[in-house]
Amino acid sequence: MSKWGEVLKSARDLVGMTQVEAANRTGLSRNTIINYEKGYRIPGADELELLGKVYKQTFVTPECSNPPLPREKEEVSA
């Protein structure tokens, strides 16, 4: 799994969403969600913005080689 795959899966898990739910909420296919999470594909800026809204996270662009792992809202506020 790529670093982006780990980040996206962690973000989805934090909001308690399945891959199917994520696909339905974003309009992306389930296969696209799977490919992002397995690191087979890297999302573009538009997809990261869309996923960020659904996962309630802020992601930087894919050009970032070491994206931060998502955190719970309480961790961000503290």
Image (cartoon, rainbow, N blue to C red):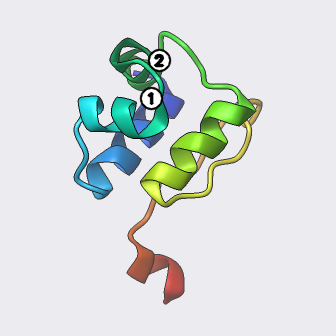
| Front position in the image: 21 or 4 | 21
Question: Few, some or many C-alpha atoms within 10 Å of disc 1 (few <14, some 14-19, many ≥20)?
Answer: many
The amino acid type of the residue labelled 2 equals Gly
Who's the residue at 60% across and 20% down the image? Answer: 42
Q: Position of residue 16 (x, y in %)?
A: 22, 53
Is residue 69 in view from this perspective?
A: no
The amino acid type of the residue labelled 1 equals Gly
Kindly indicate whether the residue at mark 2 contacts the one at mark 1 (C-beta within 8 angstroms): yes
| Front position in the image: 67 or 61 | 61
| Front position in the image: 10 or 54 | 54
- Which label sits on residue 39? 2
Which residue is labeled 1 in the image? 5
The residue lying furthest to the bottom in this view is 78
Sequence-wise, the earlier of marks 1 and 2 is: 1
In three-dimensional space, the C-alpha distance between marks 1 and 2, rounded to whole angstroms, equals 5 Å
Q: Quadrant of residue 30?
A: top left
- Give above or below for 31 relative to 2: above
Regarding mark 1 in the picture, which secondary structure is present there? helix
Left of 43 or right of it: where is 4? left
Name the quarter where the N terminus is drawn: top left
Who's the residue at 22% across and 38% down the image? Answer: 18
Question: Few, some or many C-alpha atoms within 10 Å of disc 2 (few <14, some 14-19, many ≥20)?
Answer: some
Q: Quadrant of residue 72?
A: bottom left
Who's the residue at 47% across and 24% down the image? Answer: 28
Who's the residue at 40% across and 49% down the image? Answer: 11
| Front position in the image: 33 or 69 | 33
- Which label sits on residue 49? none
- Give above or below for 42 relative to 14: above
- Give above or below for 4 relative to 14: above
Q: Position of residue 14 (x, y in %)?
A: 30, 56
Q: Position of residue 52 (x, y in %)?
A: 55, 50
